[in-house]
Image: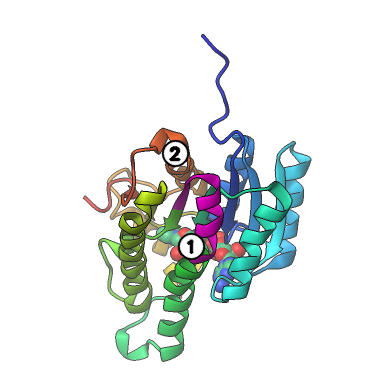
């Protein structure tokens, strides 16, 4: 048997929200599978630390401070990939925002605007910036971290759930529009995942009770790990998924069944 070739050998990836949680796990995994990675995050210092850790472990990574809600930052993240590594093959739109759960009357305009800005406008701006570079590469893979809440919602998440449903439909529309350019666009729909954002989803409930309440709705009986989501992202990013576009892959232990 031939030696196994790394899944993303030769590929260049931009990952947003890559300084923490799911994005960080994906940056580490993609780099370990041969990708050169641009760690893009609102927290520039944390992004720099993440890229340095990957480099120390033998991977290739660079960092850029990037607010996905700003067109010029989205363009700069793509430019960091093309300028440093010569091309762009994978864009992982992973940066996200949620407010804590509360009833609709308590949900502010600011919370709704922020959810739409980061979770929808951010995907639009980063993908728009990436298309010319992907066209130049002969195609590419765009991923979006949506959420199981974009498919099957819960009370208290008016802004977040609506924004993730919009992100899914945005991705599907991009999938049909960009298919002719060999650019695939797919979503991941994770359930509650062990990252810093989990505490925001739990809100002011006791952390253990909040976790138990989520677990009780998940048939496989545990929360997702960031690595569970990174594995699914690796598959969709890679040529193993060459004929898959417009898909929404639940990473949810059966929650959305
Ligand atoms: P996290 O808080 O660990 O990481 C989010 C990262 O995104 C942070 O590093 C943050 O600085 C960055 N970020 C926030 N706003 C940004 C912006 N405007 N521009 C660039 N970067 C920005 O959270 P996570 O759980 O890893 O979240 C990653 C994605 O997964 C999000 O889209 C989230 O909605 C989604 N998600 C999370 C869960 C969960 O339970 N944790 C479940 C389903 C989906």
Q: Which residue is rendered at x = 49% and y = 65% of the image?
A: 128
Residue bearing the label numbered 1: 127
Relative to 162, is 123 on the left or the right?
right
- Does the magenta run of residues contain 133? yes
Residue 213, label in figure: none
Q: Position of residue 35 (x, y in %)?
A: 62, 40
Q: Residues within 10 Å of mark 2 (few under 14, many from 20)?
A: some
95 horizontally vs 112: left or right: right
211 displayed left or right of 19: left
Callout 1 secondary element: helix
**Residue holding disc 2:** 235
Across and down, in percent, residue 99 comes to 45, 77
- Image location of residue 34, percent across then percent down: 63, 35
- Is the image coloured rainbow, by chain, by secondary structure, or in one colour? rainbow
Secondary element under disc 2, as helix, strand or loop, is helix
* Closer to the eye: label 2 or 1: 1
**Residue 90 vs residue 250, the one in the foreground:** 90
Graded by Cα atoms within 10 Å as few (under 14), some (14 to 19) or many (20 or more), the crowding at tag 1 reads many
Taking the spot 57% from the left edge, 74% from the top edge, the residue there is 71
Residue interval drawn in magenta: 127-142
Find the distance from the CA under tag 2 to the CA under tag 1: 19 Å
**Majority SS type along the magenta span:** helix
Name the residue at 47% across, 38% down: 238
Q: Residue at x 74, y 65 (%)?
A: 45
Kindly indicate the quadrant of the structure image that contains residue 173: bottom left
Which of 72/197 is in front? Answer: 72
Q: Earlier in the sequence, mark 2 or mark 1?
A: 1
195 vs 43: above or below:
above
* CB atoms of marks 2 and 1 within 8 Å: no
Relative to 240, is 167 above or below?
Answer: below
């Amino acid at each position: 048997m031939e030696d196994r070739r790394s899944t993303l050998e030769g590929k260049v990836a931009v990952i947003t929200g890559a300084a923490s949680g799911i994005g960080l796990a994906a940056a580490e995994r993609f780099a370990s599978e041969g990708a050169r990675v641009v760690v893009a995050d609102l927290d520039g210092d944390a992004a720099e630390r993440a890229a340095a850790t990957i480099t120390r472990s033998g991977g290739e990574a660079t960092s850029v401070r990037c607010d996905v809600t700003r067109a010029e930052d989205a363009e700069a993240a793509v430019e960091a990939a093309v300028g440093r590594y010569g091309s762009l093959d994978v864009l992982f739109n992973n940066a996200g925002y949620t407010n804590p759960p509360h009833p609709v009357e308590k949900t502010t305009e600011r919370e709704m605007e922020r959810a739409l800005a980061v979770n929808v406008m951010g995907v639009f701006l980063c993908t728009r910036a990436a298309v010319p570079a992907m066209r130049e590469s002969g195609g590419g893979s765009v991923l979006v971290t949506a959420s199981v809440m974009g498919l099957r919602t819960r009370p208290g998440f008016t802004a977040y759930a609506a924004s993730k449903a919009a992100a899914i439909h945005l991705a599907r529309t991009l999938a049909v529009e960009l298919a002719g350019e060999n650019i695939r666009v797919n979503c991941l729909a994770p359930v509650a995942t062990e990252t810093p954002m989990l505490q925001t989803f739990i809100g002011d409930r006791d952390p253990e009770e909040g976790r138990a309440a989520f677990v009780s709705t998940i048939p496989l009986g545990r929360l997702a790990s960031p690595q569970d989501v990174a594995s699914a992202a690796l598959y969709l990013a890679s040529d193993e998924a060459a004929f898959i576009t417009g898909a929404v892959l639940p990473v949810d232990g059966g929650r959305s069944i």
